[in-house]
Image: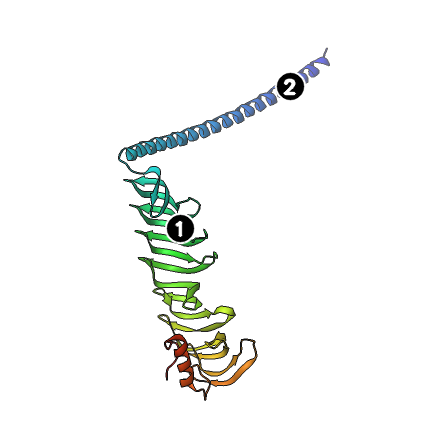
Amino acid sequence: MADDAPSEAASSAFTANMVEIVQRQADEHRHTQQLLVDELKRQRDEYKEERDAWKRRCEQAEAQLATQRESGQLTPRTLVWSGGLYYETVSHNKPHGTGVLRTLDGQRKRYEGAWKDGHFDGEGTSYHRNCTREYQGQFARGNRHGSGTLFNSDGSTACDGQWANGAMVGDGIERRLPWESCHYEGPLRNGTPHGSGTAHWPKGGTSEGRWEDGQVVGEGKAEKLPLKDGKTYTGPLQDGLPHGDGVSYYNNSLKCYEGQWEARFPPGTDRSRILDRVKKELGRIPEWLPDE
């Protein structure tokens, strides 16, 4: 009997220890569960607040829309406008808000963006006849006005800059925009070439130099610059004209003349004969051709 007493005591201690462990684990589990419940309640309350906020916004928007419709503002409609079909919001029978102008057959988009009192006004995009972007930026009363980018019909960028009443103003960058009989690439001022730029001529010729208010000034250089007689010129330029040690080529790429040039003509050229022939064919002497 004496030996059984320690065994019973040890068994009771073990049982008490196990009960304590189980109780502790149960308490930890209940604590973890309570934390999870509290977190879910917090998320539920946040979602309810967001839902109620969105509900209030929707109710306010619906009330404003109803008021505007009663007053004849921002009514979604389709109407004939400016030689085309206009789709979207209208105020007092005029495009107003955001909408799209298409051709009368509805096949081609002409303009998409903001409107005000029947005019392009705000951010918008106009389109070429082939449906590529023509201009993207700001408008005012139907004209390009503010920051905007002009695009060529092939989708390439033509120029970036500031616009006022449909014309470029201030400084800008022009990229391959037609300029007279060539394409000019370089900086602009008030919509005209101004600064160091490059003229890209048909059939791959180029001329580089400095421009001031649309006129070429000072020294420059040319590569296959087209001449009016079908030849091309490669060499230095002065005020946009061949000047210095240069070479002219026939249209079959054979060399025609190599040496010094002065104001477009090689030395010893009978200028009066050339001028007479040009005047006879064109009816006038072009501004670019020196008459002295």
Q: Nearer the viewer, residue 105 or 133?
A: 105
Q: Which mark is residue 191?
A: none
Q: CA distance from mark 2 to mark 1?
A: 86 Å
Measuring 40% from the left and 82% from the top, which residue is drawn there?
Answer: 276
Quadrant in the picture for the N terminus: top right
Q: Secondary structure at mark 2?
A: helix
Category of crowding for the residue at label 2, using alpha-carbon neighbours closer than 10 angstroms: few (below 14), some (14–19), many (at least 20): few
Q: Reply above or below: 102 against 225.
A: above
Q: Reply above or below: 255 against 5.
A: below
Q: Nearer the viewer, residue 25 or 77?
A: 77
Residue 227 placement (x, y as % from top left): 47, 76
Can I make out residue 214 in this image? yes
Can I make out residue 239 in this image? no
Residues marked 2 and 1 touching at CB (< 8 Å): no
Category of crowding for the residue at label 1, using alpha-carbon neighbours closer than 10 angstroms: few (below 14), some (14–19), many (at least 20): many
In the picture of the structure, the residue carrying the numbered disc 1 is 125
Q: Reply above or below: 269 against 8.
A: below
**Which residue ends up furthest to the bottom in the rendered image?**
268
Of circles 2 and 1, the one toward us is: 1
For marks 2 and 1, the one nearer the N-term is 2
Q: Secondary structure at mark 1?
A: strand
Measuring 35% from the left and 37% from the top, which residue is drawn there?
Answer: 76
**Which residue ends up furthest to the top in the rendered image?**
1
Q: Which mark is residue 13?
A: 2
User: 242 left or right of 122?
Assistant: right
Label 1 amino acid? Thr
**Which residue ends up furthest to the front in the rendered image?**
280
